[in-house]
Image (cartoon, rainbow, N blue to C red):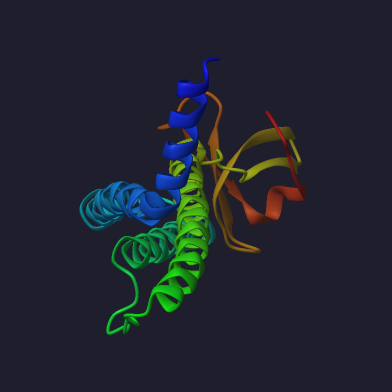
Amino acid sequence: MSPGVVRRWGELARELEFCQLDMLRKQAEGWRNGLLGLTALVTVVTVLKGRDDLSQLPSSWRIVATSLLGVAFLLLVVGSLLAVRASFGRPGEQLLLGGNSLRRWTRVETTRVRRALHLSAAAFAGGVLLVVAALGVSWTYTESPATNLVKVTTVGGTVCGELVSYVPARATLLRTSQGSDHQMVIPGSQIRRMTPASAC
């Protein structure tokens, strides 16, 4: 490399010290815009669509999905605030007009902005992961089939089916495997034994 090129690179490196804070602020503005947009999107999805989808979940799964969305929203808001702080600095902060004071402040502020950007990125990633987890909970939950299957031993033999109603010493109503509309009434006096069944 020629001495002129080396000298020019050295000049650029020295200039970079003076514009590093401005470059970090511009990066933070991009993060701020992205995080605010994603936070608004999560809010809209939660308010408009979430109610219909989550209402069909059982209460325990609904609590899990709602909690995941709530924490995701909180993380995205915190990330947005950190990005805003990195973009514009602290409100009402006074700048000292001395050269050495300005240099010290710029070093400290550059470190703060860099830290706020890293935390903002972590909050962004965590928020997106929690939104995906909440969607996964609502999409992958499948309602378990009815487990009211019983085997009833009577005087005349054994019958298997879904227990519809049971009143001791009276009658038991069973829906048998022959069809959903085929129900069998078994008088209580004929029942010898009733046990749960996994299948008929």
Residue 29 in picture, x, y percent from top left: 28, 52
Count how many numbered circles sit on residues in the image. 0
Furthest-front residue in this view: 3
Question: 33 or 195, which is in the foreground?
Answer: 33
**Quadrant (top left/top right/bottom left/bottom right) for the C terminus:** top right
Residue 22 in picture, x, y percent from top left: 33, 54
For image coordinates 52% across by 26% down, the residue present is 6
Picture layout, residue 116 above or below residue 156: below
For image coordinates 31% across by 64% down, the residue present is 84
Q: Is residue 185 left or right of residue 160?
A: left
For image coordinates 45% across by 23% down, the residue present is 4
Residue 109 in picture, x, y percent from top left: 45, 68
Picture layout, residue 106 above or below residue 173: below
Furthest-top residue in this view: 1
Q: Is residue 32 left or right of residue 140?
A: left
Residue 79 in picture, x, y percent from top left: 41, 60
For image coordinates 28% across by 66% down, the residue present is 88
Q: Is residue 45 left or right of residue 186?
A: left
Question: 168 or 189, which is in the foreground?
Answer: 168
Q: Is residue 200 left or right of residue 116?
A: right
**Quadrant (top left/top right/bottom left/bottom right) for the N terminus:** top right
